[in-house]
Image (cartoon, helix red, strand yellow):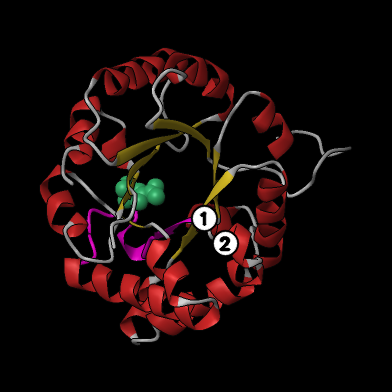
């Protein structure tokens, strides 16, 4: 089955406003291949300007890197999904391992964030993935399955069908170490299989699953060519127009 192909960049806590706008402009000026979508996950203060800059490009989406689990109220410093929606932001990362590790994004919190995203019509890019110790003892598939059971498997089929998933082994994020194409394929196929068991095969076959973890121009083509890999969630290599453009063209 042919699924959507997606190259998503996650800028994390990087770039000045000027640098971010310049980078987005360079990406927007490049031709995005047929059937490919691009997502730029940017810091909150830049979202509205980036959205305005890229508004006319259907295949280029701007994402928030996080959102509040609360709808509104006395939560100083938080940004709600309704606020994102009010500036026409369409996507939001949920469950990035850095949020899970440093900001106490537990499965319970992530379930609420997913709920808020769907209430406001945003597409969650839901991240999962195992730490090195789990990979070493060979229980990585069971670990990721549990992450899914505690969060997205609580969703109704209709909402689940709108998700984008990203498998990001923690040991490969920002380390320069990449999962081999076979390791990525094994996990993506396993994720599809547990989705089929929980919901149905048609749904499992339709969900885009991105790989994340030191994707760069030199390895993108081989990773993206795996049958169950539908693109990448890219950190470091998305911060330079040349390298991210090459990745976009790797499908
Ligand atoms: C990420 O930020 O999700 C990521 C995969 O980072 P990097 O590409 O730098 O490993």
- Residue at label 1? 163
* Tags 2 and 1 touching, CB below 8 Å: yes
- Please identify the dominant SS of the magenta region: loop
Locate residue 121, reporting x and y percent. 65, 42
In the rendered view, does 111 fall on the left or right side of 146? right
The magenta region covers 162-180
Q: Nearer the viewer, residue 139 or 48?
A: 48
Compared with 77, 196 (above or below) is: below
Locate residue 212, reporting x and y percent. 33, 55
Report crowding for label 2: few under 14, some 14 to 19, many 20 or more residues within 10 A (C-alpha): many
In the rendered view, does 92 fall on the left or right side of 119? left
In the rendered view, does 93 fall on the left or right side of 135? right
Does residue 200 appear in this view?
yes
Q: Nearer the viewer, residue 29 or 237?
A: 29
The quadrant the N terminus occupies is bottom left
Residue at 54% in and 72% down? 148
Check disc 2 and report its element: helix, strand or loop: helix
Compared with 77, 50 (above or below) is: above
Q: Is residue 24 magenta?
A: no
Does residue 130 appear in this view?
no
Locate residue 59, reporting x and y percent. 37, 32
- Residue at label 2? 160
* Whole-number angstrom distance, CA of label 2 to CA of label 1: 5 Å
Residue at 36% in and 73% down? 132
Report crowding for label 1: few under 14, some 14 to 19, many 20 or more residues within 10 A (C-alpha): many
Q: Is mark 1 within 8 Å of ligand 1?
A: no
Check disc 1 and report its element: helix, strand or loop: loop
Q: Nearer the viewer, residue 109 or 207?
A: 207
Residue farthest right in this picture: 74
| Marker disc for residue 108 | none
């Amino acid at each position: 089955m042919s699924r959507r192909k997606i190259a998503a960049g996650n800028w994390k806590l990087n770039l000045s406003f000027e640098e971010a706008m310049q980078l987005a402009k360079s990406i927007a000026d490049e031709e995005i291949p047929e059937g490919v979508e691009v997502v730029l996950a940017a810091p909150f203060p830049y979202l509205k300007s980036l959205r305005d800059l890229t508004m006319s490009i259907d295949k280029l989406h701007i994402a928030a890197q996080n959102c509040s689990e609360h709808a509104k109220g006395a939560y100083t410093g938080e940004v709600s999904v309704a606020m994102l929606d009010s500036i026409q932001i369409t996507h939001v990362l949920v469950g990035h391992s850095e949020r899970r590790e440093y900001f106490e994004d537990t499965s319970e919190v992530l379930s609420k964030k997913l709920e808020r995203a769907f209430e406001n019509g945003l597409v969650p890019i839901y991240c999962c993935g195992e730490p090195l110790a789990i990979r070493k003892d060979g229980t990585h598939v069971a670990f990721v399955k549990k992450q899914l059971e505690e969060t997205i498997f609580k969703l109704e089929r209709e909402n689940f069908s709108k998700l984008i998933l990203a498998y990001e082994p923690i040991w490969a994020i920002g380390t320069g170490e990449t999962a081999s194409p076979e390791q990525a394929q094994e996990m993506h196929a396993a994720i599809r299989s547990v989705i089929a068991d929980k919901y149905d095969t048609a749904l499992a076959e339709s969900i885009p699953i991105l790989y994340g973890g030191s994707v760069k121009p030199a390895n993108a083509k081989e990773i993206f060519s795996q049958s169950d890999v539908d693109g990448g969630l890219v950190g470091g290599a998305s911060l330079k127009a040349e390298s991210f453009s090459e990745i976009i063209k790797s499908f």
